[in-house]
Image (cartoon, rainbow, N blue to C red):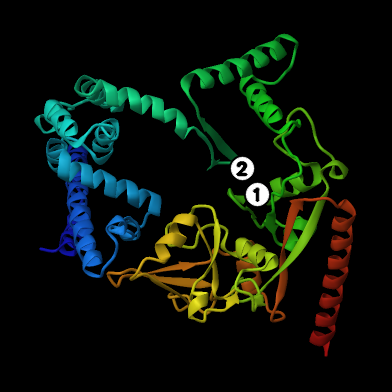
Amino acid sequence: MTVADLTRNLAALPAPASAAELISETRELEDMKSALAARQARNAVAFDLAQRREQADAGMPADQLGAGVAAQIALARRESPARGSRHLGLAKALVTEMPHTLAALETGQLNEWGATLIVRETACLPAADRAAVDEELAADTGTFTGAGDRAIIAAARAASYRRDPRSVTQRAAHAATERHVSLRPAPDTMCYLTALLPVDEGVAVYAALTRHADTARSAGDPRTRGQLTSDALVERSTGRAGGISGIEIQLVMTDRTLLQGDSEPVRLPGYGVVPAGWARQLIKRGGPGSVSTATSLEQLQTWVRRLYTAPGSGDLVAMDSKARLFPAGLRRFLQARDDTCRTPYCDAPIRHMDHILPWAQGGPTTAANGAGLCEACNHTKEIPGWTSRPRPDPTGTPELRHTVEVTTPTGHSYHSAAPPLPGTPVRAAAAGTSVAAVPAVASADPSTLHLRREIRHYAKTRKRTQHRRHESDAA
C-alpha cells in the first residue's frame, strides 16, 4: 500500500459515532502523525546520503557535498529553506545518534516537537555523549509520558550537564555571540520586536523600562505600564517620540485608497497587508500607534511614487535594461512586485536581485527575467542540477502574474507567482485601457510639496481620462 492509498483510505473512513470514539481516534491520529514524522526523518537521511553519493560521482568537492539537500526537503514539505535545514538536522540526529528518541517518536510516545527539544538540548555534545544521554533518558520506555515541554527540556539539560559539563558551559558562553534583534508580524498592524540577549543585559534593559514606567505612572501619566515601556523603548532606540524618522516605509496602495477613501487593503513591505484607514492615518499624521504625540504631515514629509499595472493580471509593467546589474529603478520595481523571496514557500526578506535565466547564458536584465531572492536561495540556485525559468502561471488562468518555475536535481518542479498587488481584483474586473495606473508608494522622504503636486497632477489626469471615456461611450 502506498502513502496515497493510505491517505484515500483514511479519508473514506466513517466519522466516529460517539464523543469517546472521537477522542480515541484523535489520539490514534496523533500517534500516526508521530510515526509519519519518524518516517520523514528516515527518508531525509536516506535522501541526503543518496544525493551526496551522486554529487561525489559528479566530481563535486568534498566540502560541498550535501549542498541543496535541505532546500529540496523544504520544497517537498512546502516549507521555507530555513525550516528544511532544521528538519534535516533533526533527522540526522535522530537516525544516527538517538535511536531511543526515534523509537519513541515512531511509537507515538513522543511527538515531533518533543523530539526536537531533546535533540536541541543535546546539540552541544559529541556524538558518543549524545547517544549516552539518549540511552539514559530512554524516551521509548515512557520516560516522558505526561511530561510537558519544560520537563523534557530540564531532563535533557540535566543529563547533558552530567555527561559533559564543559561542553554545556562552552555552549552558554558561545550563546552570547548569537545575540540579535528580529522583527515578526503580529495581528492588527502590530509586530513582535524580539531581542535575544545575555540574561544580565536583558534583565537590565527590562528593569530600566519598568522603572521609567513606574515613575511616569506616579507622575500621573494615564498610559498603562505596557504602553509606557513600549513607548520608552521606541523613543530611546530611535531618538524620537513615536519612532518615525527619516527611513522609508514604502506603503503600496491603489490610487483609490490614497485619494478616494477606498477600503482596498495596503501592503507594507516587510510586514504584510494593513488596513487602508490605518495607512492613510500614517501618511497624514506619521504614526497612528503613537499615544504621546501626533507628528504632522509637515514634520514627517511624505512623497508619492506612481507604479503602473496591467488591468488583467495586476502585474507591474516591465522595465528593460541592457546592463548586467539591475539598475536602481528596476531594483525598486522588482522589490515592489515580489515583496519577499520568490523561492516557493520561502518568505525571507529579499537580499539579492537575481537573473532567473543566468546573464552568462544570455538571460536579459529585465523585469520578466528578474526575481528577488534571499541570500540562501540565491546560493542554492547555483548548485548543479537546479534550474529556474520564467513561465506563464501554471493554473492556466487568463489573469497571468509573473511566475517562476524551479526544478530541483530530482526533476521535481515547483512554481512561485508574484503576490497580487493591492487592488488587483478591482482592476481585473474593470474594462479600460491596456495599462491601469494604480498603486502609489507613499514613503517617508523629503518633500511634502512633491506629494501635493503628485496628487493634484494625478487627480487631473484621472479626471481627463474619465471624461474622454464618457465621450467615447456617448458616441
> Could you tell me residue 333's position as x and y percent?
65, 66
Quadrant of image for the N terminus: bottom left
Residue 131 at what x, y percent from top left?
15, 34
Q: Nearer the viewer, residue 387 or 325?
A: 325
User: Residue 336: which quarter of the image?
Assistant: bottom right
Task: State left or right for residue 475 relative to residue 58.
Answer: right
**Gap between marks 1 and 2, in whole Å?**
8 Å
Question: Which of the numbered marks, if any, corresponds to residue 189?
Answer: 2
Q: Counting residues from the N terminus, which is met first, the one under dot 1 or under dot 2?
A: 2
Indicate which disc residue 333 carries.
none
354 and 35: which is toward the camera? 354
Label 1 amino acid?
Pro
Q: Quadrant of residue 313?
A: bottom right
Callout 2: few (<14), some (14-19), or many (20+) C-alpha neighbours within 10 Å? some
Image: 220 above or below 160: above
Mark linked to residue 275: 1
Q: Is residue 62 above or below residue 247?
A: below
Picture quadrant where residue 395 is located: bottom left
**Residues marked 1 and 2 touching at CB (< 8 Å):** yes
Asked which secondary structure carries label 1, the reply is: loop
Q: Is residue 203 left or right of residue 7?
A: right
Q: Is residue 221 rendered to the left or right of residue 394?
A: right
Specify whether residue 139 is in view.
Answer: yes
* Quarter of the image that includes the C terminus: bottom right
